Image (tube, rainbow, N blue to C red):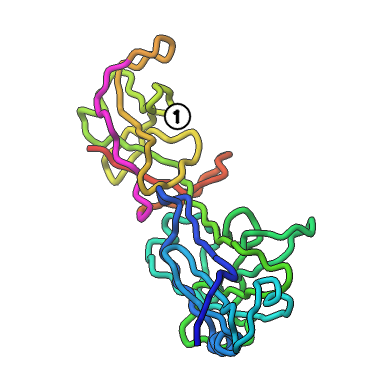
Amino acid sequence: MKYAYKVLVNVSFSHTYFSNKVFAGLVFTPSSSTQLLFLNNGLLFKQNYGGFTIAFDTNFNGEKRSREEFISSIINCRFIATLNDFNFYNYTAVAEIDISKKVFHFYNAIDDNEVLNKSLHSGEFVSEYDLKNIADFDETYFVKPFAILDLKIAPDLLENYSLNFKAKETIWRYILMGEHLQSLNSPAIIDNNGKEPFDGPEYLKFSGTKGLAFRSKKAISFSETSVQNFQLVENFDIETGRYKVVMRALPKANPELITLIKEENTIANNNYSEIFIN
């Protein structure tokens, strides 16, 4: 018997944190009932780098069939996702703090404008709005999955869907701790274009010592390999654009080190990345 498989549907995972925008930290597995459905309907599941593919046998039980013919009937499939990247929540924009009893719930659907949505989540990116209490599902899981995907194979099934994650943004704060750095004349932190994206300096106290701090004017997105570079300069003259370079490339913020600073101000994002310079 010859098998001839064609693509039924592709699902890809993307993340703005990575330079290639591909997220390879998820592994999806068909549920036991879905595996049986696949076996009975001539479907093949294949996990890919940054996604998975479902293919159908075009010559099933001796009868040829097209994709259009196959999706004319409705088949409900469920997939369970595990997360292999333990740093995921450090660099991913999800506002939910306690997810111990929640899972992400993804599904293919039609949006409010009755347009087929290529993403499997509610917004442009996966967010806390896609979380659902694990108790709301009709199955019991010995280990709480990262996500549950309900994929309906039906006449409106698209060939390509996606899960899109966004990198977390934090307020970056460079803190100069060394005395030689604190004694600089008119210090500033500038970007590649000579612009000043940081406010400051201001003195902060740390357990009997003090540091000279510069705070980014807006939140900065984490990136695996950021092309954005900041440098420490002195004798900075904003009118003429002249300055003397002290440190040409300051270290980037570490996604594993985030401080939640509660203060009464107008900054919407109180997640800080503090970078100490000695």
Quarter-wise, where is residue 194 in the image?
A: top left
Q: Nearer the viewer, residue 247 or 192?
A: 192
Quarter where residue 68 is shown: bottom right
Give the structural element (helix, strand or loop) at label 1.
Answer: loop
User: In front: 197, or 107?
Assistant: 107
Neighbours of disc 1 within 10 Å: few (<14), some (14-19), many (20+): some
| Image position, residue 176 (x, y; %) | 29, 34
Which residue position is annotated with label 1? 197
Q: Position of residue 105 (x, y in %)?
A: 60, 71
Tell me where residue 211 appears, x and y as whole percent.
30, 36
Query: Along the horizontal axis of the image, is 241 left or right of 164?
Result: left
Residue plotted at (57% across, 59% down): 126
Asked whether residue 251 is drawn in magenta, I would say yes
Rendered position, 149 above or below 248: below
Along the line of sight, the residue nearer the viewer: 252 or 278 = 252
> Which residues lie in the magenta part?
243-256
Front-lying residue, 51 or 92: 51
In reply to whether residue 27 is colored magenta, the answer given is no
Determine the residue positioned at 54% across, 57% down: 164
Residue 38 horizontal side relative to residue 221, left or right:
right
Q: Position of residue 60 (x, y in %)?
A: 59, 85
Q: Quadrant of residue 248?
A: top left
Q: Residue furthest top?
A: 240
Q: Is residue 213 left or right of residue 245?
A: right
Q: Residue at x 50, y 47 (%)?
A: 270
Numbered circles on residues, count: 1
Does residue 111 lie above or below 81 as drawn?
A: above
> Amino acid type of disc 1?
Pro
Q: Is residue 185 left or right of residue 135?
A: left
**Dominant SS in magenta:** loop
The image quadrant where one finds the C terminus is top left
